[in-house]
Amino acid sequence: MLKRTFVAVLLLTIAAWGQKAEEKTLAVAALSLTPEPWDKQANYAKLEKYARQAAAQGAQVIVAPEGYLEGYVGNQHRTPDLTRERYAAEAAEPLDGPLLSRIRALAKELKVYLMVGFAERRGAQVLNSAVMFSPEGGVALHYSKSHTMNDEPFNTKGNEFPVAKTEYGEWGALICFDRQVPETARILALKGADILFVPAWGGYGEINDQMMRVRAYENGVNLAFVHPKRALLIDPGGKIIAQNEGEHDQIVLGRLTVPSRRKGGLLKYRRPELYGELSKP
């Protein structure tokens, strides 16, 4: 009897250890920084300073806000006198542009994943984009904002929701107002995303905090909300793991856990055959 009990306990211990071994944790740093409008050089210098500090503190993933590189000048409320010519010429740059190339090199030097929001010049178009460079200097994730309040007159809206496969699970991104349309986060979750990165600029506060917690909970995902004045790291249960203190420039560092096999959460109770009306204009 004693022997059987010992064996049972041993098997349970091994099973529990194996389950924990399946989980992967990663240190995420949300850079809650306010950039200068139009001054990409100064904004890069601040990004580099804080990214180095975050990496020294053990961060494996570092994320800056929406439109950080050029100071989010593409919004008509922030820049009422904006012209298409100036925006495309002075604010935007392609994915292989000079400042983004420096950010790519910084990610490789620090051996971290590094995400930044920027005005992306793509042919004749400009898009509100975010790119995540990998520790090897490659592009791990590249997303363009798909939803706006029609307040970015010279930005072309994106139409795709990519998911990146990494050694720390699968990742997706949304940008600012995208988070207020629940279908966007749900699409990424259904495509397998374990973590949603949400660089933002617009409104923040209690309603937004609750919204971000709900987005994490209803989709069973980790979520990192990164705003110049607010940062949240949230687990799949909707619990805030880390958040900013005050509205000054700062690093918000926390650890997110990604299981090797998703538990499904609320998604397993869906009945997609009933939802056809959602796709109607």
Image (cartoon, grey):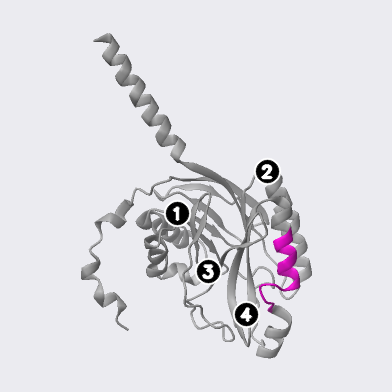
Q: Quadrant of residue 30?
A: bottom right
Which residue matches tag 3? 175
Which residue matches tag 4? 74
Earlier residue among tags 3 and 1: 3
Residues packed near mark 3 inside 10 Å, few (<14), some (14 to 19) or many (20 plus): many
Which residue matches tag 1? 194
Range drawn in magenta? 92-105
Which residue matches tag 2? 57
Q: Quadrant of the N terminus?
A: top left
The amino acid type found where label 3 is placed reads: Ile
Residues packed near mark 2 inside 10 Å, few (<14), some (14 to 19) or many (20 plus): few
Secondary element type, mark 3: loop
> Mark 3 and mark 1: span between their CA atoms?
17 Å
Earlier residue among tags 3 and 2: 2
The amino acid type found where label 2 is placed reads: Gln
Secondary element type, mark 2: loop
> Mark 2 and mark 1: span between their CA atoms?
24 Å
